[in-house]
Image (cartoon, rainbow, N blue to C red):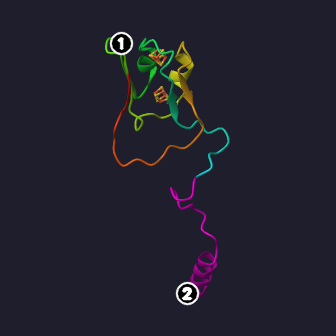
Amino acid sequence: MAYFTMTKMALKWALKKPVTKQYPFVPRVPMPGARGQLEFTKDNCTYCTVCGKKCPTKAIVVNRQAKKWTLDRLLCISCNACVEICPKDCLQLNGHHGTVVVTKDKEIHG
Ligand code: SF4
Ligand code: SF4
């Protein structure tokens, strides 16, 4: 009896469409309200370091003297704290999933 039930269930699931997507070959549509990835616009940045101090994961490091703004994207949890605190509106969360990466390079602007 158990064998019959198990076979029936296996056949039922084998004939269903997969519930997962073939990411990254099939792009994922972001959920409504998703925060997405952090974007930095350097034009108005004064390298005040406030965003780096506010970041809970230390994903942002700002070097005021060298005028370098660095993001470790793998540390960013899209919490929005830096976006809210930036006095120059240089930071935004874009609402989209990021691209798949195979290296742990940091993004350096400056
Ligand atoms: S808080 Fe804004 S202006 Fe200040 S360093 Fe960060 S991005 Fe630049
Ligand atoms: S969104 Fe949050 S975790 Fe990401 S860089 Fe800004 S403060 Fe840090």
> From this viewpoint, is residue 58 visible?
no
State the residue at coordinates (54%, 44%): 97
The furthest residue to the right: 32
Left or right of 107 in this view: 26: right
Q: Amino acid at mark 1?
A: Arg
Q: Nearer the viewer, residue 20 or 1?
A: 20
Circle 2: element type: helix
Q: Nearer the viewer, residue 19 or 62?
A: 62
State the residue at coordinates (52%, 59%): 25
Residue bearing the label numbered 1: 64
The answer to whether the residue bearing label 1 lies less than 8 angstroms from the nearest atom of ligand 1 is yes
Left or right of 36 in this view: 32: right
Image location of residue 18, percent across then percent down: 60, 68
Residue bearing the label numbered 2: 3
Q: Which comes before the other along the chain, label 1 or label 2?
A: 2
Q: Quadrant of residue 26?
A: bottom right
Image location of residue 33, percent across then percent down: 66, 38
Circle 1: element type: loop
Distance Cα–Cα, label 1 vs label 2: 68 Å
Q: Is residue 11 magenta?
A: yes
On screen, residue 23 above or below 30: below
Task: Tell me the mark number nearer the camera, choosing from 1 and 2.
Answer: 1
State the residue at coordinates (56%, 20%): 84
Instruction: Give the residues in magenta.
Output: 1-27
Q: Is residue 77 magenta?
A: no
Image location of residue 105, percent across then percent down: 34, 38
Packing grade of label 2 (10 A; few <14, some 14-19, many >=20) is few
On screen, residue 25 above or below 100: below
Q: Quadrant of residue 92?
A: top right
